[in-house]
Image: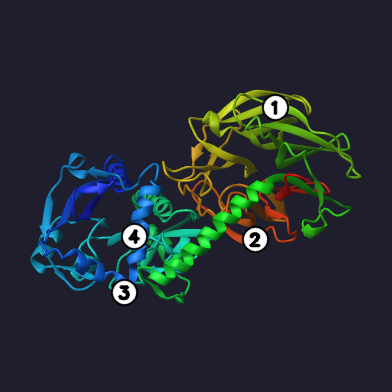
Amino acid sequence: MNKEKLKIGLLIEDYNLPRWTYEMIEEIKHSDYSEISLVIKKQSTTTKKKSLIKRIYSKRRNILFYLYCKLENKLFKPVPNAFEQKNLSDLINCPEITVSTEETKFNDKILSKDINIIKTYDVDVLIRFGFRILIGEILNCSKFGIWSCHYGDNKLIRGDSAGAWELLNQWNASGITLQILTEDLGGGQTISKSFFCTNNNSINWNKNNFYWKARSLIPRKLEELYRLGEKDFFSNLSKYNKDPFLYYNRIYSTPKNLELLKAVFKIFRNYLRRKVFKIFCFEQWILLYDLTNSEKISKPLYRFKRIIPPKDRFWADPFVVNKNNKYYIFVEELVYKEKKGKISVIEMDNNGKYGDSKVVLERDYHLSYPFIFQENGQTYMIPETIQKHRIELYKCIDFPMRWELEEILIDKIEAADTTLFKYNDKYWLFTSLKPNIGTSVNDEVYLFYSDNLLKGNWKPHPQNPIISDVRCSRPAGNIFTIGNQIFRPAQNCSKHYGYGMQIREIIKLNEYEYEEKQIQSIYPNWENDLLGTHTLNLCGKLTIIDALIKRKRFI
């Protein structure tokens, strides 16, 4: 027996909606789990337009911010543009109710006569795409409440101009929160959160990132509600919201003139610093290793020795095989003038003496992250092949130099840094994907599983994406075990790509559940020339990482 789809109602002010909203509604409409059954449109009101002088006077304390935004609209046009207008009337065909509201300075309260009509439609979820702060009985007009996206991490920022303040304050990450609305404006039940890297050049671009991230949140959670059912879904939400929380920041409002001037000065100063840096210096990925008599991971990074490539290239993403009493370090090697990565190997003996890099795998598309593993006596590699739109598996024919394509694990997928882990007789494939256009491959990690490596039907995990946070999503090396504990290294790409790492402990891993928790953050703080580190691997007595350093061009 097929389950009845969720009935969705839309709260809008106009049928002309931004592209991100239109695409979200389009996905909901054509899904197997929900249908659009009602549109609630706010009755338009005509207000006397103020004169230009009065409008300027009313915004005098924030006039520079409005002018700055207008300048950005000219200089920083987002691509793809989440704000592009599309007409919803071409997409949906369902009943519409035009409602009247009692309006205060910030709030909208729908009148009782309209509330009674709305209740007759027995909607499961109302989604807010318009109106101001909603109060009153409308909050109880749908079975599972009104769902609304808050543009910002509600633990850090509440109020106005989210998307702008993250840039003006130079925060590394920006957040987005999906909530069920209540009369307590800051106390709504949080359904989901996601974090992405703050764009440090433009408010416009950063807000564009906000909305493209929002485009995925509601459909995912509607599908989860449909799949789990009311009891399990809200039981999970109760656990997600169980921790006490006190909001400690101010209520943010539109930036005042002096606030904007100070912030723009800092942004411009940082921009000039980056330009000057590029004239005299360049960034290069190098390798660092520790080879001792201890196989423990607890090692101070300042003791690691460096392997520095020539200035015309970088080495990154190190993976290691211990064979023939040697360590074979496989890396992404990218010669700058070629603008395309290939896989190379560096041989190291037990005393830490190493030779030159040798190319072992090269294609007409970019290769990186040479994930190496052994299975049934064979050595395999899953390099990143995101430009080819598939996940490829290579088999070693003559170690370490000859590799042949063995299998395409998943086709028609833009996947980054695929990492395989065998656990409980299943193969678990962790990989970073873009959920939709306008988003980054750094923000979310997805999980697939199969009973068979070579001929497996890779099934997506029902909790996908298992993590949606730029600070701890993208894989950063082999998943490893210590005793009964399982640890997953993850990249922290909040400040910039490859900024740092997190060690995450996997708590639950099965076909229905996934859970992990943070154990340690690793930042590039142990030397002055370090800018980032984003891969960690262990093999025998060798621990190896990569690091992004700044090097002088003319010395």
Amino acid under label 2?
Answer: Ser
Amino acid under label 1?
Answer: Leu
Q: Nearer the viewer, residue 345 or 396?
A: 345
Rendered position, 171 above or below 498: below
**Residues at marks 2 and 4, CA–CA distance in whole angstroms:** 40 Å
**Residues at marks 2 and 1, CA–CA distance in whole angstroms:** 33 Å
- Residue at 21% across / 44% down in the picture? 88
Which residue lies under the disc numbered 2?
521
**Residues at marks 3 and 1, CA–CA distance in whole angstroms:** 58 Å
Tell me the mark number nearer the camera, choosing from 4 and 3: 4
Sooner in the amino-acid sequence: mark 2 or mark 1: 1
Q: Secondary structure at mark 2?
A: strand
Mark sitting on residue 184 = 3
Sooner in the amino-acid sequence: mark 4 or mark 1: 4
Mark sitting on residue 361 = 1
Tell me the mark number nearer the camera, choosing from 3 and 1: 1
